[in-house]
Amino acid sequence: MSMAPAQKISTPARRRIDLQVVGPIVALIALVLIGMALNSNFLSYANITNVLARSSFIGIIAVGMTFVITAGGLDLSVGSMAAFVAGLMILVMNLLTDRLGVTLPVIFAGVALALISGLVAGLINGLLITRVGIEAFIVTLGTMGIYRSLITWLADGGTLSLGFEMRELYRPVYYGGIAGISWPILAFVAVAIIGEIVMRHTAFGRHCAAIGSNERVARYSSIAVLRVRLATYVLLGVLVGFAVVMYVPRLGSASASTGLLWELEAIAAVIIGGTLLKGGFGRIWGTVVGVLILSLIGNILNLTDFVSPYLNGAIQGAVIILAVVLQRKGAADR
Amino acid sequence: MIKTLIATTALVTGFSAAAGAETIGVSIPAATHGWAGALNFHAERTVERLEKVYPDLDFVLTTTPDSATQVSDLEDMVATRGIDALVVLPFESEPLTGPIQRIADSGTWVTVVDRGLAVDGIENLYVAGDNNSFGRTAGEYFAETLDEGAKVVVMRGIPSTVDNERVAGFEAAIDGAGIEVLAMDHGNWNRDTAFTLMQDWLSRFGQIDAVWAADDDMAVGALAAIEQAGRTGEMFVVGGAGMKEMVDRIRSGDKSVPVNVTYPPAMISTAIEMTAAGIVGNAPMSGDFIIASELITLDNADDFFFEDSPY
């Protein structure tokens, strides 16, 4: 039933899709070439690992954000939510360390707490949006402020830090890995692949696109619009929790400046990747490319004295707009 | 002067000054980073203490996330609480200069903390850290410790006058010492940004002898990146502001963190205490009070370690 409208959308758009596909990939290849030309260490194992591993937090969140945006929603609260979940996780893990000592169960409890609190936070956003019927922009703007204040309050304005020994035990989750590939990169790859499959080959993915494309038609097609939409926010919340699980072992701390502007980076990555901001069409692998583009810009700027550091933001802004122009051009020419 | 002020505010607010108590308003930025968190911690403690010491004094403490909110806070303090004195750490100099000048013109005692106003002579008392000395103290340590030809990287804060003054002090101090600054970029006083920046610098430069991180949050990020790259021991990191974890590493003799430079957030306590003393007693309190930055070393680290401070 629900397959029919999705197919109808994709058939006339085939010519346009080719141009859309090229845009972000061209931008990514251009950035890699620029990076290679400017610094010989750009393609070194250490640098590639650094860039991919640091992309993983935004990347994991951006995959969830792709579903939310595809279904016509938006979530501005993810950065603050990540900071709050990280703070909560550290607090509880420190408390448990006092009782259980520096042991693995403490880490498992912390991981479970991060995922559950992410889920609950996503559920709150989703319920307010779907059941109370408030605009997603307003709800998540509100929760963004709430979580940011809560982490500041939890940390007493300072920084929450994991106990030193616990940090050593948990540290390999960010810095370790198998076969030379670090865990955050593997986690990001796994989330992206599962996300791509869910988006393209499951009823849930199709329903997201259908709702974002035309909510009323989706409802007439007997799609449980509210439930699907709620599920996108819950999924995003869980992924925020998962990103935090990878983030906390990095520096072992959370403060009021943790996750600042992550929501905008995640949204920018989704849009650069070719997902429509107004919903109806989403592309997970595009989001991955978008995340890599954003990380590479920062990396390349740090590796050179090419521009004044005051202009970093301008370069980033210009590349974001360019990447989107490249893919929208096809649509305009048509 | 204060008597006339009570008369005018009494006209406006009717009853707030009726008890004869005098009110001191304190307006500071919200605890959005570690240093500001400690500022809040010390402000709250000082207010609690002084309320016991001077039963006749009332305090209004507000924290503000941005300049516009701070202007509204100040207006509210004057209109509804009839403050007799104001202790303010301006969020930004330019936008706050006008509103604070109007409050000063109405006869209210004004103490400005740390961030100077754009126009001279508005405040009665100015209490501040010395940003130039903050950079100079770190720079002097670099010049003394490092050999000629040493290579360093510099992590700056959020682009601002505070940051410019610190860097100017640092550059002046290492001038002529033969130290090469490989790169200088903004870590925005943020751990994550500093971590990323340091990772990239470590891939870019084969030799780094020292890092000036200009703030302890950034030093934490830089140290984590150095450890990840397995280059601990090749370089030392000097942060600043005296975060307790850093002071703890200094006093345990950690070679990666040999020294630190103070920029005490407790300066807000200095400002509130001096203002209260000036309002209650007759001790002259007007003028400038500049708190110098000190070098924390292995020998004196114990004096700078505060167990229960959040920073």
Image (cartoon, coloured by chain):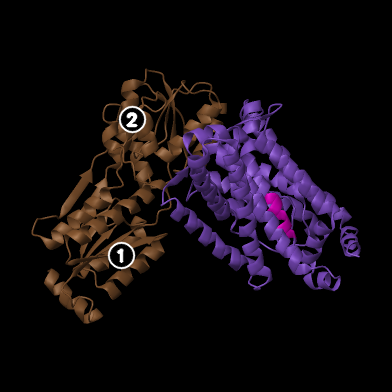
Chain colours: A purple, B brown
Residue B109 image position (x, y, % from top left): 19, 63
Residue wearing tag 2: B139
Q: Amino acid at mark 1?
A: Gly
- Quadrant housing residue B138: top left
Q: Is residue A205 above or below residue B56?
A: above
Residue B151 image position (x, y, % from top left): 44, 23
- Say if residue A268 shows up in the picture: no
Residue wearing tag 1: B98
Asked whether B18 or B12 is in front, the reply is B18
State the residue at coordinates (55%, 65%).
Answer: A142
**Chain to which the residue tagged by mark 1 belongs:** B
State the residue at coordinates (69%, 27%).
Answer: A180
Residue B115 image position (x, y, % from top left): 31, 52
Q: Secondary structure at mark 1?
A: helix
Identify the magenta region. A62-70
Q: Main secondary structure of the magenta part?
A: helix
Q: Residue furthest left?
A: B282
- Say if residue A223 shows up in the picture: yes
Q: Is residue A239 above or below residue B59?
A: above
Mark 1 or 2 closer to N-term? 1
- Quadrant housing residue B203: top right
Q: Nearer the viewer, mark 1 or mark 2?
A: 2
Residues at marks 1 and 2, CA–CA distance in whole angstroms: 36 Å
Q: Amino acid at mark 2?
A: Gly
